[in-house]
């Protein structure tokens, strides 16, 4: 185990007063570029390359040592390190102690070897994914190497909307409109509505001549008797006007029985 | 042929075989967003190629296929074969009910034609939206009639032949009159007095604002 | 075959000859820039057609041509042959360069799918920024897959048909080196020691890559 440390100090690109200039430059590049790293695992993967071995046979202890030195270097150069770099450093310190010390039987949890194996697996997996990504990006790609039809012909959707309406719908609609007319006292179609005011005015002018009992329907204005809508409006207005005149004491009203004609005559002033 | 010989002499490399040139033209025409001229083809293909000749082969190859090489001006492009055009259309048939506004407007036009928009509005008691009339015009059930000789010379609407066809009428005069409607019970479908005003009015008001086609 | 016979019996009209069907598939695929599924082909072709059979013929016809019929997931498309790319400078669309984080994330999703964000982070050893995933979602190379049945029901990511189309893959099973990676155990979800009780373990790891494109 101690030999690993010794080996490390000789080979380390990050530390040592007796390293070559090239190594020093490489080490500085590593540190200065810390922002360029995609996290601690990325740093570890980069460091692992100096071991030039299959990632499965990597010395995790050696790697941990390298990483911790890297962190120290970064700190001494006052490079701001993200928290996760420090977390990794702490974890690797822990791992290092587990690897160096004989296992404590009283202690729970995974052994140093298990943890180291997992770290090696993570590094190998990350490396594999990077290689896969490179292979993927190197494929013949659509829009770069392979092309789709330049003048696609769009499928036109022809929406045939057919509207269904039957003669019955049409007649019902018309009937509905006409029926509505007959029942709409509020309708603003002025020419088929006789207002109370209009009827009253007309009646006032006429009752002076009503010496005999006269059917109030004869007081409807000319032309209001044939159209049912107009007749209805005129009848109602005339009847209301008659009641108004009776209230004023100007006329008398008489009806012999239900539905019999309503008769009206002038009342002599008292 | 002599031109090709000249090219060959000029070129340091031998031109690719014509079958390869044909493949190149095929790929370029396929991928290009616009028809490509022979000149452009030659510019894009390796030196010594003869796009015009490759095109002759390519056009022959696509004769009778589902897509053809067509000439557009002095350029060439792939186009789906004319007899395949039916595949480029997706027809969907939707049947919708005419909106109440539309059917009422149509009813008024058919019973009162020629009728102006103002008259339709008076009969319906609500304004008629442009959309409703447009829809009926589009369906070719109504069309413009003569202008009224009254002030403003308003346009009138009348029903069309296709309206008569659709509703199985010989002429608009065949429409049943009010008396017949009553006899058929269509005018007796009055709501009981007292209930007819409120809901009818309410409904009408809503419809009035949107006059949307019913989906 | 028996199914086809059934169809033919059901149909009032005989299906067009296979050569015509081939032309139809050719026209439809040519007209579309996007891959078209066999199902869509059948829907667009006359009743009784067998797009899958026509496709077999069509693919054979275009073998070695300047454009080829390629399979993308369950769909097919015409694409220029890869060896013609040197002619295509003009057509190349400059795409936004993907960041290293985005490329790695995409690779992890494609090889490990369906995969959760936490798993991507575990593999990369850093957190995945929202922007990275957004970029991939926007490119329509990844989409949300099913939620995991583990606590928190985390959402998973999977690659899309556009991803396959872009990278010229018939299916995600054709990803380069997939078999080797799997054989080396590098696609297993292996939780860190001491966390064996993690809920993800078990079936999920095996199912990876098999749940592809299930809707």
Image (cartoon, coloured by chain):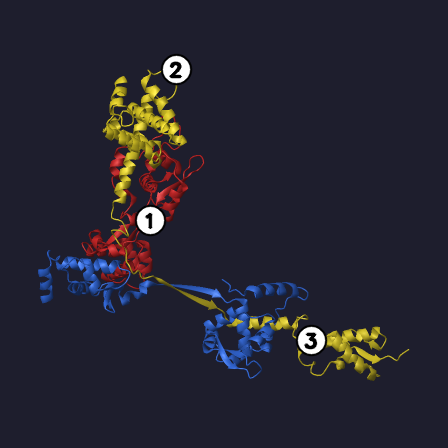
Chain colours: A yellow, B blue, C red
On the image, the x and y values in percent for residue B161 come to 46, 78
> Which of the labelled discs sits on residue C96, or is there none?
1
The image quadrant that residue A16 belongs to is: top left
Number of residues whose C-alpha sits closer than 10 Å to that of mark 2, classed few (under 14), some (14–19) or many (20 or more): few
2 vs 3, front mark: 2
On the image, the x and y values in percent for residue B165 come to 45, 76
Number of residues whose C-alpha sits closer than 10 Å to that of mark 1, classed few (under 14), some (14–19) or many (20 or more): few
In this view, the residue in front, B54 or C152, is B54
2 vs 1, front mark: 1
Mark 2–mark 3 Cα distance, whole angstroms, equals 107 Å
Element assignment for label 2: loop
Mark 2–mark 1 Cα distance, whole angstroms, equals 56 Å
Asked if residue C56 is positioned above or below residue A209 in the image, the reply reads above
> Which of the labelled discs sits on residue A106, or is there none?
2
Given the image, what chain letter belongs to the residue carrying mark 2?
Answer: A
A137 lies left or right of B114: left
In the picture of the structure, the residue carrying the numbered disc 3 is A193
In this view, the residue in front, A84 or A182, is A84
On the image, the x and y values in percent for residue C119 come to 37, 35
On the image, the x and y values in percent for residue B53 come to 15, 64
Q: Can residue A45 be spotted in the picture?
A: no
Q: Can residue B93 be spotted in the picture?
A: yes
The image quadrant that residue B208 belongs to is: bottom right
Given the image, what chain letter belongs to the residue carrying mark 3?
Answer: A
A265 lies left or right of A19: right
In this view, the residue in front, C192 or A215, is C192
Number of residues whose C-alpha sits closer than 10 Å to that of mark 3, classed few (under 14), some (14–19) or many (20 or more): many
| Residues behind callouts 2 and 1 on a single chain | no
Q: Say whether marks 1 and 3 touch (CB < 8 Å).
A: no
Mark 1–mark 3 Cα distance, whole angstroms, equals 75 Å
């Amino acid at each position: 185990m101690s030999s690993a440390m010794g080996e490390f100090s000789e080979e380390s690109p990050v530390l040592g007063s007796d390293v070559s200039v090239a190594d020093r430059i490489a080490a500085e590049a590593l540190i200065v570029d810390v922002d360029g790293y995609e996290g601690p695992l990325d740093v570890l993967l980069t460091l692992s390359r100096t071991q030039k071995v299959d990632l499965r046979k990597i010395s995790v202890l050696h790697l941990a040592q390298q990483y911790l030195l890297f962190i120290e270097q970064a700190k001494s150069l006052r490079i701001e390190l993200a928290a996760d770099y420090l977390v990794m450093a702490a974890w690797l310190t822990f791992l290092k102690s587990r690897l160096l010390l004989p296992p404590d039987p009283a202690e729970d949890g995974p052994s140093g070897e298990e943890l180291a194996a997992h770290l090696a697996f993570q590094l190998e997996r990350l490396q594999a994914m990077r290689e896969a990504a490179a292979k993927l990006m190197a494929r013949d790609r659509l829009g770069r190497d392979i092309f789709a039809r330049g003048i696609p012909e769009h499928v036109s959707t022809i929406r045939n909307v057919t509207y269904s309406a039957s003669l019955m719908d049409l007649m019902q609609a018309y009937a509905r409109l006409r029926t509505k007319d007959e029942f709409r006292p509020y309708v603003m179609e002025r020419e088929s509505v006789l207002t109370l005011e209009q009827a009253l005015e007309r009646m006032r002018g006429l009752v002076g001549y009503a010496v005999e009992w006269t059917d109030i329907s004869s007081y409807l204005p000319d032309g209001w008797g044939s159209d049912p809508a107009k007749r209805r409006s005129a009848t109602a207005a005339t009847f209301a006007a008659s009641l108004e005149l009776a209230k004023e004491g100007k006329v008398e009203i008489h009806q012999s029985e239900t539905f019999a004609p309503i008769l009206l005559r002038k009342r002599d002033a008292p | 042929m002599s031109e090709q010989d000249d090219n060959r002499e000029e070129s340091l490399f031998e031109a690719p075989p014509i079958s390869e040139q044909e493949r190149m033209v095929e790929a370029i025409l396929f991928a290009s967003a616009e028809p490509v001229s022979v000149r452009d083809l030659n510019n894009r293909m390796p030196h010594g190629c003869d796009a015009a000749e490759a095109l002759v082969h390519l056009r022959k190859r696509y004769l009778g296929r589902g897509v053809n090489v067509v000439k557009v001006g002095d350029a060439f492009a792939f186009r789906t074969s004319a007899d395949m055009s039916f595949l480029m259309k997706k027809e969907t048939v939707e049947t919708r009910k005419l909106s109440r506004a539309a059917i009422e407007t149509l009813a008024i036009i058919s019973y009162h034609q020629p009728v102006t928009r103002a008259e339709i509005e008076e009969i319906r008691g609500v304004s008629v939206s442009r959309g409703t009339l447009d829809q009926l015009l589009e369906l070719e059930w109504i069309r413009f009639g003569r202008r009224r000789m009254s002030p403003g010379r308003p346009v009138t609407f009348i029903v069309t032949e296709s309206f008569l066809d659709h509703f199985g009428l010989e002429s608009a005069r065949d429409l049943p009159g009010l008396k017949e409607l009553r006899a058929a019970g269509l005018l007796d479908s009055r709501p009981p007095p007292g209930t007819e005003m409120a809901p009818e009015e309410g409904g009408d008001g809503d419809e009035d604002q949107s006059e949307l086609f019913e989906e």
